């Protein structure tokens, strides 16, 4: 089994480009309202709701490798390879990455809120209450945290060698329900990608090398025949 044949792992790499756009959207949301009398307390409360709460949940149950938050592969319809990938998820690196991401989001959110006034003309929430802006910022912060954990898990699985994966026992569906956070509508049914292994690639390369002498011999025979006819 090769982890690189699972298309959902490659789809999760889209977070590399999506997270900066989500942070930009967060800046535009915060630019729509003036800070209140206690902006520091407001930022801490928004971070606690949008980041700290989801971080506690993701610590207990890491994000499922076959879930894209809005849609997922049906748990009852998953293949053995997908259950094996779920068992290969190492909870500790994902949890550490999630904690680092949660800690980094606090100063980042603080900085964005301090400089949000620069984007006030572009904000879709111009002259809206501060409570509305913070309320809409919370799910966006939770989305960034979810994608950070899934991104780390996808990179870790794609970087593993395929040989040790074949002997790893797959996770049962009951364990998946109790140990992973499987969110989204069960609508994803994607076919595995065709990934050529090193052995097959070497065999095809050897075959192409072996054809060359045969072609050279045929050309030599054709030249001799032309000389005899002439």
Image (tube, helix red, strand yellow):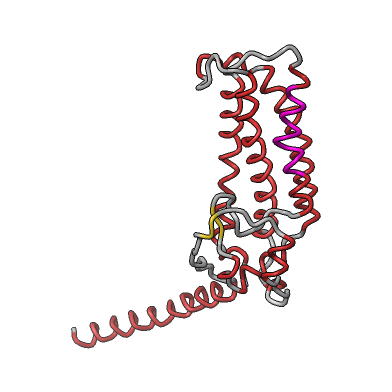
Q: Is residue 36 shown above or below 25?
A: above
- Residue at the extreme left of the image, as rendered: 230
147 in the magenta segment: no
Please report the residue visible at 72 percent of the width from the left and 72 percent of the height from the top. Answer: 164
State the image quarter where residue 111 is shown. top right
Who is closer to the viewer here, 7 or 188? 188
Residue 46 painted magenta: yes
Q: Position of residue 69 (x, y in %)?
A: 59, 50
Residue 172: x, y in percent? 69, 72
Residue 82 left/right relative to 90:
left
- Across the whole image, how many numbered discs are drawn on residues? 0
Q: Main secondary structure of the magenta part?
A: helix
Give left or right: position of 214 versus 10: left
Q: Is residue 51 left or right of residue 92?
A: left
Tell me residue 26's x, y (percent).
60, 28
Residue at image coords 59%, 44%: 15
Could you tell me which residue is drawn at 66 percent across and 33 percent down?
Answer: 138
| Residue 200, above or below 122 | below
Q: Position of residue 117 (x, y in %)?
A: 61, 14
Q: Residue at x 70, y 14 (%)?
A: 36
Quadrant for the C terminus in the image: bottom left
5 or 195: which is nearer to us? 5
Position of 117 relative to 221 (above/below): above
Nearest to the observer: residue 157 or residue 65: 65
The residue range painted magenta reads: 42-55
Q: Is residue 58 above or below residue 130?
A: below
The answer to which quarter of the image holds residue 1 is bottom right
């Amino acid at each position: 089994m090769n982890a690189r044949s699972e298309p959902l792992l490659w789809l999760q790499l889209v977070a590399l480009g999506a997270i900066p756009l989500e942070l930009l959207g967060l800046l535009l949301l915060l630019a729509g309202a003036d800070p209140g009398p206690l902006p520091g307390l407001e930022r801490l409360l928004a971070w606690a709701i949008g980041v700290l709460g989801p971080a506690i949940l993701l610590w207990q149950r890491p994000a499922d490798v076959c879930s894209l938050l809005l849609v997922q592969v049906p748990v009852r319809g998953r293949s053995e390879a997908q259950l094996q990938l779920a068992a290969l998820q190492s909870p500790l690196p994902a949890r550490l990455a999630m904690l680092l991401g949660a800690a980094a989001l606090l100063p980042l959110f603080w900085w964005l809120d301090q400089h949000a006034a620069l984007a006030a003309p572009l904000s879709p929430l111009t002259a809206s209450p501060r409570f509305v802006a913070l309320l809409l910022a919370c799910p966006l912060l939770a989305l960034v945290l979810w994608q950070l954990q899934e991104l780390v898990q996808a990179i870790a699985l794609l970087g593993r060698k395929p040989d040790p994966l074949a002997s790893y026992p797959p996770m049962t569906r009951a364990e998946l329900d109790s140990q992973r956070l499987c969110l989204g509508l069960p609508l994803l049914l994607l076919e595995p990608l065709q990934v050529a292994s090193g052995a097959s690639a070497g065999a095809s390369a050897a075959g192409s090398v072996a054809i060359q002498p045969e072609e050279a011999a045929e050309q030599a025979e054709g030249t001799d025949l032309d000389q005899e006819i002439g």
